[in-house]
Amino acid sequence: MIIVLNPDATQQQIDHIVERVTKLGLTPHVSKGVERTIIGVIGPEDILRVTPLEVFPGVEKVMPVLAPYKLVSREFKPDNSVITLDNGVKIGTNKIVVMAGPCAIENKEVLLETAQEIKNAGATILRGGAFKPRTSPYSFQGLGEEGLKYLVEVGKKLGLATVSEVMDPRDIGLMVKYVDIMQIGARNMQNFNLLKEVGQTKKPVILKRGMSSTIKEWLMSAEYILAGGNFNVILCERGIRTFEEYTRNSLDISSIPAVKHLSHLPIIVDPSHATGRWNLVPAVAKAAVAAGADGLLIEVHVRPEEALSDGNQSLIPSRFKELMQELRVIAKAVGREL
Ligand code: PEP
Ligand code: MN
């Protein structure tokens, strides 16, 4: 349920509602908008149905949340959510955030060289996988904790925040210790135990869209994380599987405005996994910014021909730098900055 308060509702009235609702075994979430405050109330349907929420002083009206994803829905929180990282970088503001780096952390030297390049080009977050979800068990699986150590060391040295994928609930403690953002990959979007566990932390999470998931299923997965108490979720469109084989996936550009309409959560786009081809990445990245994405996640490698994974979709630093300049023009044209 959503309790919409009168524009002149007092803090005392808000506190009173929060206290009473909590006592009834329901969970209130207060969101203070520019115009008015609303309180989203989550809990068992049977309690909600019989509780007369309209009676509290300061209440204008009470409405049911129609979407199956409650906390994630824009009905529940009309204003855009902004995720703030420990180093102050914000995701979900007017400023578009670029995250870049190699698919996998291969060694400290390549990571440092690549990180230096992406930083010089204007990216603020360094990506790199330490636990890799590879299709073949014989492919490079990542360096594990050793990789996370390199990521943090390089990130600290250059003043870049860090993002890396978590595949196993048993690694969450490690991830929380090392990285600024945990990524849940496409293959794990419906790993509900993993979602529940990251929901128990406060660490920002990038939730990638599953390869064959609908927007609704994706938002329901985000709901698992928010329901656990972690509201720091960033959605990432990375293409879905279609009959097309020329590209690795098919980017669903319409998911960007759709998610913006349905949810308050920020959405970023990964043009690298969406296309699988480096020469297609710049156009798709620009289209994503034009369509309203809050950020981009791009694979960059100093020597893609030597990369241990996804070399064919990784940009070389000079092309990445050029792309950043092109993106600034697009961002400006749609009233944003980069
Ligand atoms: C990745 O970002 O390295 C990755 C494996 O992406 P996805 O889960 O989108 O395939
Ligand atoms: Mn990759």
Image (cartoon, grey):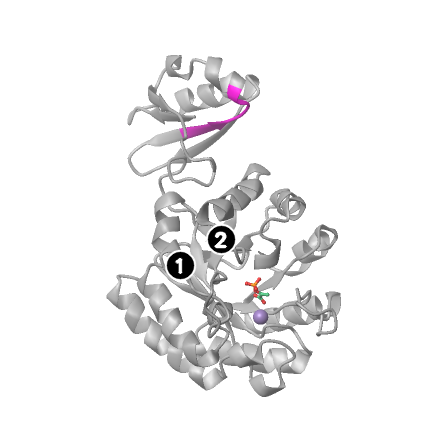
- The quadrant in which residue 122 appears is bottom left
Q: Is residue 35 left or right of residue 318?
A: left
Point out the tag, 2 or 1, that comes first from the N-terminus: 2
Q: Which residues are magenta?
A: 39-45
- The label number, if any, that marks residue 234 in the structure image: 2
Q: Considering only vertical position in the picture, is 202 above or below 107?
A: above
Q: Considering only vertical position in the picture, is 297 above or below 18?
A: below
Whether residue 139 is visible: yes
Q: How far apart are the two marked residues, 2 and 1, measured between alpha carbons?
A: 9 Å
Q: Is residue 212 left or right of residue 173?
A: left
User: Magenta stretch containing residue 322, yes or no?
Assistant: no
Is 155 or 198 nearer to us in this picture?
Answer: 198
Is there a contact, CB below 8 Å, between mark 2 and mark 1? yes
Residue that badge 1 annotates: 294
Give the residue drawn at x 39%, y 15%. Answer: 56
**Residue 188 pos. (x, y %):** 62, 54
**Residue 263 pos. (x, y %):** 40, 44
Give the residue drawn at x 71%, y 50%. Answer: 169
Indicate the amino acid at tag 1: Asp
Whether residue 181 is visible: no
Is 124 or 316 nearer to us in this picture?
Answer: 316
Which image quarter has ligand 2? bottom right
Question: Outermost residue toward the front?
Answer: 243
Q: Considering only vertical position in the picture, is 183 above or below 44?
A: below
Indicate the amino acid at tag 2: Ile
Disc 2 residue: CB within 8 Å of ligand 1: no
Label 2's element? strand
